[in-house]
Image (tube, rainbow, N blue to C red):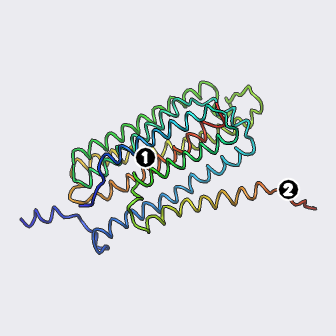
């Protein structure tokens, strides 16, 4: 039989996630300028990490699984950063047709 | 006696050396599938990012048309369903057949609550002429890009809702199999990887909620 965590661990994980939801919801009503987006993303990333660590058992699983989990995120960052690099630098160099 | 001993052992496929290797292979396969799902949704998140930076102000105004109470409630519903799912995986590992069955049914029910609330929201959007196409109506500035926001909104939440619906189907089938004792005696692999899928769908919504409903400040 595989070792299991106590139910308390999962309940507290869920309570932490609901608290983060309350935080992101409350911050949306405060005008922080561009920081509204940054806080919203930071809270979402924190929630994703908590879900992956405790609900999906990344904490305590093998290095191989850590690698597989991180690989998807890294390719997503390639996708977004290279495309934004293209869009944000269009028109920097004048082209003579 | 011999039969009883055999039945209390997990079934190991011929291609695996032992049960640990089989479990690791199942989880690795699921995580690789989830990486492809990250890129599947990633294309939509990328499109969202580009248009958000290009038409920021329109996105702020269109986002206010979405019902933040229904969206926030749905976030809580999915987070609690993930708790039931995590407890279901635990029950499967502990060979608690009845508890496992009920937790899987509970997860599926909360999934149904999520899809129902989403349906109420879509109906409101329909009544308010916010569904892109011939009947789309926008009285603010820049109606063309307002419509673009709703294209992105329906594509992202629609793809996510399809994933939740698939998840509900998986949970109901697993609940039936759990009741029949198919996951007893250490054969909990299927429940565990189905759990990984469910939690992943939860993570996608965790990003969709702030990016679609909480754009700018309200």
Q: Are marks 2 and 1 on the same chain?
A: no
Tell which subunit mark 1 falls on.
Answer: B
Query: Secondary structure beneath disc 2?
Result: loop
Can you give x and y, in whole percent of width and height, for residue B25 in the image?
37, 67
Can you give x and y, in whole percent of width and height, for residue B27 in the image?
39, 62
Res. B50 mark: none
In this orientation, which residue lies closer to the viewer: B83 or B158?
A: B83
Q: Which residue is mark 1?
A: B166
The image shows residue A90, relative to residue B140, as above or below, that is below
Q: Residue at x 73, y 25 (%)?
A: B139
Residue B142, by quadrant, is top right
Q: Is residue B123 left or right of residue B102?
A: right
Q: Residue at x 51, y 30 (%)?
A: B70
Q: Is residue A97 left or right of residue B133?
A: right
In this orientation, which residue lies closer to the viewer: B166 or A57?
A: A57
Q: Is residue B55 left or right of residue B18?
A: right
Graded by Cα atoms within 10 Å as few (under 14), some (14 to 19) or many (20 or more), the crowding at tag 2 reads few
Q: Quadrant of the N terminus of chain B?
A: bottom left
Tell which subunit mark 2 falls on.
Answer: A
Q: Residue at x 52, y 47 (%)?
A: B204
Cα–Cα gap, marks 2 and 1: 44 Å
The image shows residue B2, relative to residue B125, as above or below, that is below
Query: Secondary structure beneath disc 1?
Result: helix
The image shows residue B109, relative to residue A46, as above or below, that is above
The image shows residue B206, relative to residue B9, as above or below, that is above
Can you give x and y, in whole percent of width and height, for residue B26 in the image?
37, 63
In this orientation, which residue lies closer to the viewer: A46 or A83?
A: A46
Can you give x and y, in whole percent of width and height, for residue A17 in the image?
45, 43
Res. A91 mark: 2
Graded by Cα atoms within 10 Å as few (under 14), some (14 to 19) or many (20 or more), the crowding at tag 1 reads few
Q: Quadrant of the C terminus of chain B?
A: top right
């Amino acid at each position: 039989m595989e070792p299991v965590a106590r139910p308390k661990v999962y309940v507290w994980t869920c309570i932490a996630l609901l608290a983060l939801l309350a935080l992101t919801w409350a911050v949306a009503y405060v005008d922080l300028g561009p920081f509204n987006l940054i806080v919203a993303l930071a809270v979402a990333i924190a929630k994703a990490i908590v879900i992956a660590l405790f609900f999906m058992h990344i904490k305590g699983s093998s290095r191989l699984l850590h690698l597989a989990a991180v690989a998807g995120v890294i390719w997503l960052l390639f996708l977004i950063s290279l495309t934004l690099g293209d869009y944000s630098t269009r028109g920097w160099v004048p082209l003579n047709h | 006696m011999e039969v009883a001993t055999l039945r209390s052992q997990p079934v190991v496929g011929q291609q695996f050396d032992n049960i640990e290797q089989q479990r690791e292979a199942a989880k690795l396969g699921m995580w690789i599938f989830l990486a492809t799902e990250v890129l599947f949704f990633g294309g939509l998140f990328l499109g969202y990012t580009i248009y958000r930076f290009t038409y920021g102000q329109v996105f702020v105004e269109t986002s206010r048309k979405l019902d933040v109470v229904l969206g926030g409630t749905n976030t809580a519903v999915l987070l609690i369903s993930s708790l039931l799912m995590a407890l279901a995986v635990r029950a499967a590992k502990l060979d608690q057949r009845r508890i496992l069955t009920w937790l899987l049914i509970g997860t599926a029910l909360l999934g149904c609550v999520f899809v129902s609330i989403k349906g109420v929201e879509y109906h409101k959007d329909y009544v308010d002429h916010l569904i892109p196409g011939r009947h789309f109506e926008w009285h603010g500035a820049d109606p063309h890009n307002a419509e673009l926001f709703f294209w992105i909104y329906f594509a992202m939440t629609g793809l996510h809702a399809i994933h939740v619906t698939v998840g509900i189907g998986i949970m109901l089938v697993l609940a039936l199999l759990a009741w029949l004792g198919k996951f007893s005696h250490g054969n909990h692999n299927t429940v565990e990887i189905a759990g990984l899928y469910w939690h992943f769908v939860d993570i996608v919504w965790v990003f969709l909620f702030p990016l679609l409903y909480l754009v700018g400040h309200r």
